[in-house]
Image (cartoon, coloured by chain):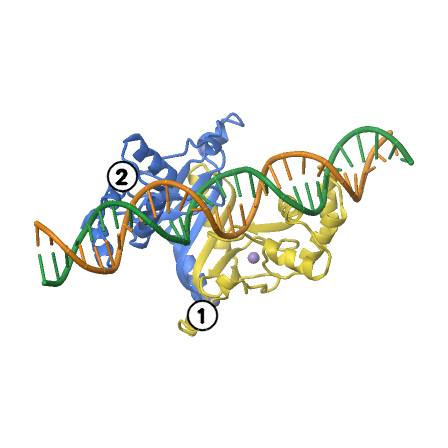
Chain colours: A blue, B yellow, C green, D orange
Amino acid sequence: MDAAGRFARYLASHRLKMTRSRRAILEEILSIRGHFTADDLLDHFRRRGREVAPATLYRTLARLVEAGLVHRIDMAKGQARYEPMFGRHHHDHMICLRCGKIIEFENREIERIQAAVCRRKKFRLLEHTHQLRGHCAGCSRTGAAARSAFASGGIDVRSPGRNPS
Amino acid sequence: MDAAGRFARYLASHRLKMTRSRRAILEEILSIRGHFTADDLLDHFRRRGREVAPATLYRTLARLVEAGLVHRIDMAKGQARYEPMFGRHHHDHMICLRCGKIIEFENREIERIQAAVCRRKKFRLLEHTHQLRGHCAGCSRTGAAARSAFASGGIDVRSPGRNPS
DNA sequence: GAAAAATTGATAATCATTCTCAATTGCGAG
DNA sequence: CTCGCAATTGAGAATGATTATCAATTTTTC
Ligand SMILES: [Mn+2]
Ligand SMILES: [Mn+2]
Ligand SMILES: [Zn+2]
Ligand SMILES: [Zn+2]
């Protein structure tokens, strides 16, 4: 089933309604490839005239996360990032502290060991985050000259395709 | 060298002063075993009459983190946790979503693979967080009855000794 | 001990996100 | 279709942990 269908099913099973705003937000997210912030989306809408209130966007993002269609990435500070998870599998992130770029990685071995550690401690694992912070290839090369797009908002919006590694 | 000495050295090398407040804060932290929030510390001080302004505490905690004597654990929401890192080595955390307990774990294998992944992507790793969230042994056992000490502040303050695993 | 430099603390500011609540909309029943 | 009611929306206020301001105070230096 497609994303819209899955969302509809989720809404129905929770006595929630498929409204114009929710449809528009899902639509907009599906058109994005990569990671984005709530503000990124608000900007997109503003530019197209179609306004969506922040409260509504935040509420809908929470629903989409609930429904498993979107993943939320909590940063140590500043805004959270989101990414569409439709048709993708779990992965973790490397975050460049210079330019803000987000690189995805996926490692079965780590996940396996992680599960084993939890088993040993009798810990029922529900979710996890594994964030690697440092300098991306580009920023390591170009000394201190890297334009710090991080602070000023020029954040990454790119994904390495369906199967990151 | 002891913690106070290391802090003194750090301060000196940064043209900073060893003040009464900074000494008191470090002292207090050393007396704690386990994880704590800024508010936990403020409470301790308040109870002993010796007041310390929040601004001062936050500033000092930042210095201690800089100096490598304290580690800061950013939670997805709510206050950050801190823990003394004096004489301890790196480890990561499992966080119980029911009772808030923090369990430490350390796994060389994961860290090794993590480093390899970074090498492959030419990413210069500077720091990382690996948080496992779920239910601790106790909370898994006692169904939904677990008192949610998390929201109400009764957070863990315990460490499994010098060498977690 | 005085001057210079750093620190403190009261207070205001930040800022992403959530809350409130009156007005609006979606939708199932009739 | 049209009601009726529950769910949703949006404007604006509230939250809450942390940081910024800045005058008064403490430390260190000379
Ligand atoms: Mn991703
Ligand atoms: Mn710890
Ligand atoms: Zn970079
Ligand atoms: Zn627990």
Q: Quadrant of the C terminus of chain A?
A: top left
The disc placed on residue B139 is: 1
The residue drawn where x is 33% and y is 47% is A61
Residue B165 at x, y percent in the picture? 53, 62
Residue B33: % across, % down: 63, 62
Q: Is mark 1 within 8 Å of ligand 4?
A: yes
Q: Dot 1 surroundings within 10 Å: few (below 14), some, or many (20 or more)?
A: many
Q: Could you say whether the residue bearing mark 2 is in a helix, strand or loop?
A: helix
**Left or right: where does residue B75 sit relative to residue B6?**
left
Q: Quick check: A45 above or below A75?
A: above
Marks counted in the figure total 2
Q: Which mark is residue A28?
A: 2
Tell whether label 1 touches label 2 (CB within 8 Å): no
Q: Residues within 10 Å of mark 2 (few under 14, many from 20)?
A: few
User: Circle 1 sits in a helix, a strand or a loop, which is it?
Assistant: helix
Circles 2 and 1 on the same subunit: no
Q: Is residue B100 visible?
A: no
